[in-house]
Image: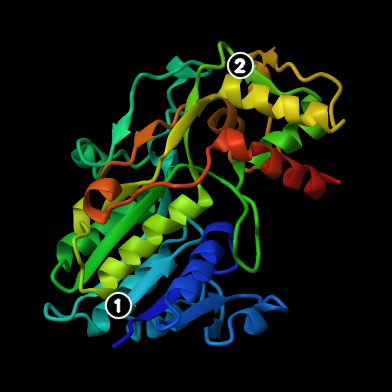
Amino acid sequence: MAPSIFLTGGTGYIGGSVLAALVKQHPEYDITVLLRNVPDTFTSQYPNVKIVRGDFDDTTLIADTASKADIVIHNGNSKHEPSIRAHIDGLLRNGTPSSPRFLIRLGGTGAIADWADPSYYGEKNPRVWNDIHDIEQLTSLPDTALHRNIEKIVQKAAVDHGDRLKCAIICSCGVYGPGKGPGRAQSQLVPLFCDEIINNTKRAFYTQSGGNTRSWVHIDDLVAVYIKLVEAAAAGGGNADWGLHGYYFTATQEVSQLDFATAIGRILKKHGVIEYEEPVQLPLDDIWKTAQKSKWRYTGIYAFACNTRTVSERARKVLGYEPKAPSLLDCLEEDVLAAVRREA
């Protein structure tokens, strides 16, 4: 019998791409999505996908819908505790040791980013996180770590109800490439950098040596991890790791801020968006003044000066994950031009 799946964030960049892949690769799956607003083309694009109208504050609706699902794929607001608790409550209503339910939650490598430690602002941090060898530290990060409030809820559910509820966190790094879903088509980091260049600095930029380094994954490779985890869940758990060890990095490469800025500066100059292609070195004080649209004061530091270095070993080992997409630098021009069009 085909599994029933409840997915949130279906019009977002990642969630929408996961939805598109699930529908294409597994038309037999019974899929329901939570949508606050339904895009005009959604029902014609996905005629067999059921829709429940609501948002993350509709916790009764979420719990009731999750209770009817075998698998929940929860994307979206990374700080919204009531919605993740509602998913867990719903899944536990019908999960049993002989027929457990599955929760796949999107996290992010902001959890291990060194934004709170100025020691490596603008410099390469030698610390590289591995989702197998560092699992004890990853599951006991300080409460100040990004996404930690949600991860603690998921991990507590995994410990308390592990016989009935199998949990996994996909801790993605920076994402690039065009989204495949019905809504948002771009990730955050490339558009954020382009916005800062076009509307503020007029030059690509870095700080200090520009050695701070970020892990990256193409949206298609990230979606491949999702699909493999969903397929494992549909098979009763498969060979996947769940519970406290169900923590999956997705990185396929890493790029320094200097190399990132150099490549984007070249592209923007080539297309007449800026006058000079060479990136400029900005003082740290100026980096603190970037990304002013964000309510979080560390956004500029996080995006342009800190490190998020990870190795995706678990997905390769237990899921047979084999990244196939082209590299960030090979895809960057398309992403940059899409961001420029958005700014126009």
**Tag 1: Cα neighbours inside 10 Å, few (<14), some, or many (≥20)?**
many
- Amino acid type of the residue that numbered disc 2 sits on in the rendered structure: Thr
Q: Quadrant of residue 141?
A: top left
Residue 153 placement (x, y as % from top left):
30, 59
Horizontal side of 239 relative to 51 (left or right) equals left
The residue pinned by badge 2 equals 207
Q: Does dot 2 land on a helix, a strand or a loop? A: strand
Vertical placement of 322 versus 195: above or below? Answer: below
- CA gap between label 1 and label 2 equals 46 Å
Residue 121 is situated, as x and y percent measured from the top left of the image, at 50, 19
Residue 201 lies in what quarter of the image? Answer: top right
Left of 161 or right of it: where is 310? right
Whether residue 333 is visible, yes or no, is yes
User: What amino acid does circle 1 point to?
Assistant: Leu
Q: Which residue is at the front of the view, 232 or 293? A: 232
Q: Position of residue 203 (x, y in %)?
A: 77, 22
Question: Which corner quadrant of the image does residue 137 belong to?
Answer: top left
- Residue at 28 percent across and 88 percent down: it is 1
* Residue 293 appearing in the image: no
Q: Give coordinates of residue 266: x percent, y percent.
A: 74, 25
| 97 to 105, vertically: above or below | below
Q: Is residue 342 above or below residue 210?
A: below
At 64% from the left and 84% from the top, the residue drawn is 43
Q: Which residue is mark 1?
A: 91
**SS for callout 1:** helix
Q: Nearer the viewer, residue 61 or 200?
A: 200
